[in-house]
Amino acid sequence: MKEKNIKTITVNLKGRPYPVYIEKDILRNFGTYFEKHVKTRQIAIISHPGILDLYGAQLKASLPSDAEICEILVAEGEQSKSHETLWNLYTQLLENHFERTSAIIALGGGVIGDLAGYAAATYLRGVHLVHVPTSLLAQVDSSIGGKAGINHPLGKNLIGAFKQPNFVFSDISVLATLPEAEIRCGMGEVIKYAFILDNDLFIFLEKNLEKALQGDPEILQHLVTVSARHKAQVVASDEKEADLRMILNFGHTFGHALEAESGYGILKHGEAVILGMKCALYYSHEINMLPKTDYERGMALLNRVPLKFDKSIISTDNLVKRIALDKKVSEKNVRLILIDKIGFWKINENSDIKRMYNAFNILNEV
Ligand SMILES: NC(=O)c1ccc[n+]([C@@H]2O[C@H](COP(=O)([O-])OP(=O)(O)OC[C@H]3O[C@@H](n4cnc5c(N)ncnc54)[C@H](O)[C@@H]3O)[C@@H](O)[C@H]2O)c1
Ligand SMILES: [Zn+2]
C-alpha cells in the first residue's frame, strides 16, 4: 500500500511533529514506516503474549531482515503498570545490550503503551518509541499525546513522564479481535470528544453507535480518525497539560471516583467514563448551562451503550469524598468540565458538592 493512501494525522508539537497513520490492514507495511522514522536496527517489541501471537509475526516480517529484534512479554492487565514489571523490562533491555539509539515498539492497548512508553522515556535517559495501538481506547486516546507511566499502590498513573513517540501506527483491522467490552470502553472516549468538541461526530454516533459497538471496520475507521485528530489538536496546543488538555477530563472527575470506589476491575475505565458523562450532563443541565433538548439527546446516546452497573452497592458520600482526592482537583476548588451545548466544553470552577451528590444519584435511575 502506498503511503499516500494511508490517512495521516500530524501531532503538531513545536519543533518535533509526528504522524499518526490510520488505515485498515496495514500492519504488514509497518516496516516501511519504521525505516522512514527510526534509524536503528536494534528493536524491542513490548507486548502481551496473546497480542504477540495474533500480530507479532506480521509486524516482525515487515521489519528489515538484518534487524536485531527482542520480544519482551508482560502479563495482561492494569497490574502490569508496576514498578516490578518496569524493572524487569530494564533488565531485559540491559541484558540484550540495548543502546541509546535503539527503539521500543509498544504493541498493545493502553497498558502496554503507558508501560513501554515510560520505559522508553527512562531507559538510558530515553530511546526511540513507536506506538502500535491495538485497542480502540489506545487508538483514539492513549497512544497520542505522550503521557506515559505506571501506577503506585496509592493511586493510578501517579509515576510517569511525557514521552512522545516517533510515530503512531493504528491498523483498524486489529480491532476485529478486540472483545466487545473493550470496544465499549474506547467508545466512551469517542463519545467524550463528541460532547466537548464535535456536534457532527455526535450526529454520526446517533446514526451509527450500534454498528460501531459491533465492530464495523468502516465506522471504526471514521471514529478513530476523527478522535485522533481531536486528541492531536488538543495535545498540540497544550503538551504538558497546563491548560486546554484538561477539557479531556469531561466525565472523568465523576468517572474516576466511580472507578476507584467500586474497586478497580469492577468497572472498566471507559465504562466509568460513560457513567461519569451522565453525571456531567446532569450537572450541566442542573445549573442551567445545558438546554433540556441537548441534555436529553446526550443521555439518550449514553443510554444506548449497554452497561451492567449497580450503583446501589456504592455510597454517594464516598463518591463525593473521592472527588476531593482526585489528583486533578486543586485543593479547595473542585473544577468540572461541563458542556453548554453538544460539541462545546465549559470549565466550571468551584463546583457545588450538593449538586455533585445529586449527579451521582441519577445513576440509580438509569
Ligand atoms: N497515556 C494516556 O494518555 C492514557 C489515556 C487513557 C488511558 N490510558 C491508560 O490506558 C490503559 C487502558 O488501556 P486499554 O483500555 O487499551 O486496556 P488494555 O491495554 O488493558 O487492553 C484491554 C484488553 O484488550 C486486550 N487487547 C488489546 N488489543 C487487542 C486486540 N487487538 N485483540 C484482542 N485483544 C486485545 C488486552 O490484552 C487487554 O486484555 C489504562 O492503564 C489507562 O490508565 C492512558
Ligand atoms: Zn479516559
Image: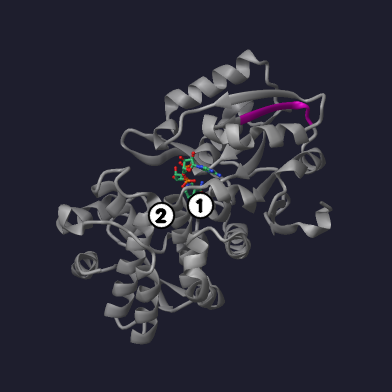
Residue at disc 2, secondary structure: helix
Q: Is residue 48 above or below residue 10?
A: above
Q: Which residues are magenta?
A: 40-45
Q: Nearer the viewer, residue 33 or 216?
A: 216
Mark 2 nearby-residue class (10 Å; few <14, some 14–19, many ≥20): many
For the residues labelled 2 and 1, say whether their Cβ atoms are less than 8 Å apart: yes
The picture places residue 320, in percent across and down from the top left corner, at: 21, 58
Q: Nearer the viewer, residue 68 or 318?
A: 68
Q: Is residue 280 magenta?
A: no
Q: Which residue is mark 2?
A: 270
Residue type beneath disc 1: Leu
Label ID, residue 137: 1
Q: Is residue 335 visible?
A: no
**Label 2 residue near ligand 1, CB within 8 Å:** yes
| In the image, the residue with mark 1 has its CB under 8 Å from the nearest atom of ligand 1 | yes
Is the image coloured rainbow, by chain, by secondary structure, or in one colour?
A: one colour
Q: Which amino acid is tagged 2?
A: Gly
The crowding category of the residue bearing disc 1, from other C-alpha atoms within 10 Å (few below 14, some 14 to 19, many at least 20), is many
* 343 with respect to 122 (left or right): left
Q: Residue sitting at 82 percent across and 24 percent down?
A: 66
Quarter of the image for residue 316 reads bottom left
Q: Quadrant of the C terminus?
A: bottom left
